[in-house]
Image (tube, rainbow, N blue to C red):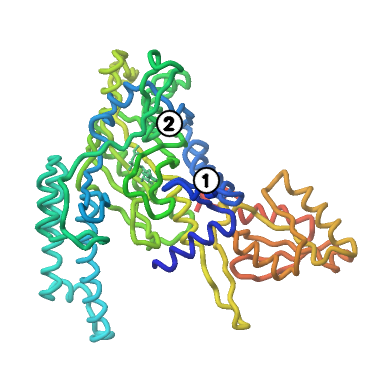
Amino acid sequence: MEDKFKKVVSHAKEYGFIFPSSEIYDGLSAVYDYGQNGVELKNNIKNYWWASLVQMNDNIVGLDSAIFMHPTTWKASGHVDAFNDPLIDNKDSKKRYRADVLIEEYCQKIESKINKEIAKAKKRFGDDFDLDQFTNTNERIIGYKEKIESITSQLAKALEGDDLKSLKKLILDLEIVDPISGTKNWTDVKQFNLMFSTKIGSTAKSSSDLYLRPETAQGIFVNFLNVQKSARMKIPFGIAQIGKAFRNEIIARQFVFRMREFEQMEMQFFVKPGTQKEWYEKWKQNRMAWHMSLGLGEENYRFHDHIKLAHYADAASDIEFNFPFGFKELEGIHSRTDYDLSQHEKHSGKKLQYFDTELNESYVPYVVETSIGLDRMFLAVLSNSLVEEPLENNSSRIVLKIPSVLSPYKAAILPLVKKDGLSEIAKDIYNKLKAEFNIIYDEKDAVGRRYRRQDAIGTPLCITIDHQTLDDNSVTIRNRDTMEQKRIAIASISDEITKEVNLKNWLGR
Ligand code: GAP
């Protein structure tokens, strides 16, 4: 798995998907730049999300609010007081860790012991192996499971009660050691706020403190009435937004999985109080269906209901994805109650209520939120799609089997050779199609090498103009995944690409 992850990171750089930020100065930790192919893939993911929510639902509209917001926003939302991570330092290595993550990782180690026992038993019993019977009767596994349960419930209790002393005690009781120094020489656990602050204004006297937003959602809440009134929206309705968010992550690792500057795609769905559970379930299913439509493999997704609810939620679940480093959170679905709108009412002194004409009364709506990290979705697509495939002649090819609706380029136009007028025909085809699709023209090197280059960036179709084209206006069209080629008329290229990449064919699945 580690090897696979390294391959994803180096492929991302080599093929212009993701570069470390300001690399010539040795980079900036947990900040990345998207290259020429990365920006296309990222835009296509945004578009796929936006189309499925805003374009396909007449009760959801979009928004693009500013990154800077009035500082009281973050007091009202609870981020100033409660957007903290519990951190612990090891006095010998001088490294800092999230206390809850150290404990979770300890549990994962026990989990892998369970998996080893299962693998051994599978080998021993062969076809007669019964997983349920084995895990429910094997004493060692039962012991491991009980240990995980006990640790998890102590962890949940400590987190819920903000009990930092108990968190430290749990780390000491479990004899967790620092992976670097190997010692148990820990400091006390301290809370650390994740928001970046900056200043607005030119003079020290007139300037005031601001935060870089740690989530896009608050821009939606403070605009709730602006949008509702100007678009005459009726509850239930949603507001969707894509934008940058910033968090001073202490444990910044795993490439674009945990960044300090990242992008979120969030949708707040405003509902009648009392109906939030029903909408929460609907949005859980709806978002999972969106993921399934991309075909990255049903087995790579699972729900994980939260043990510790955030300060604003009455229910919350993650959609986890099987990244190269295991199942981790990709998207959150949160039932946020009326917490945010009520808090903004209180702090601004302005009413943020909806007048329900059917009930003839005003109320503060409840909110169900869907929130997905764009960069995490990018990593899910990239890591799932990168394949090294053996070929018949004992060689292999690297291919990115990206869902073609998301591919940076939809097709490559390739003259077999530069001479005999083939380049001219190819350029003509390219020029006629480029307003319709994002396509690429390539005439350098042998055609086999050009196919490999397109495979490596995930181009689903390669269109080759050869000598037969001069006779009958036909071209070959090669499928990235099957490598099968067929001849089609120049006049039908546009239809063939459309068939492959049309949103309707993907979102309707
Ligand atoms: N408005 C709710 C909210 O922000 P969250 O679970 O903190 O909830 C939502 O974040 C999503 O944003 C996560 O599921 C994840 O995909 C993404 N995300 C959060 N922190 C991130 C980080 N440091 N780097 C990349 N993506 C992140």
Q: Quadrant of the N terminus?
A: bottom left
The answer to whether residue 8 is above or below residue 258 is below
Apparent side of residue 95 relative to residue 393 in the rendered image (left or right): left
Apparent side of residue 126 relative to residue 262 in the rendered image (left or right): left
- Residue 392 placement: quadrant: bottom right
**What is the number of the mark on residue 136?**
none
Query: Going 25% across and 61% down the picture, which residue do you hit?
Result: 179
Mark 1 residue element: loop
Apparent side of residue 48 relative to residue 112 in the rendered image (left or right): right
For disc 1, the marked residue is 22
Q: Give the residue type that dot 2 points to.
A: Ile
**The residue carrying mark 1 has its beta carbon less than 8 Å from ligand 1:** no
Query: Going 73% across and 61% down the picture, which residue do you hit?
Result: 463
Image coords of residue 180 (percent x, y): 27, 61
Q: Please name whichever residue, 405 or 455, is drawn nearer the observer in this view of the structure.
A: 455
Q: Residues within 10 Å of mark 2 (few under 14, many from 20)?
A: many
Image coords of residue 404 (percent x, y): 58, 56
Query: Going 23% across and 45% down the picture, which residue do you hit?
Result: 87
Of mark 2 and mark 1, the one earlier in the sequence is: 1
**What is the number of the mark on residue 239?**
2
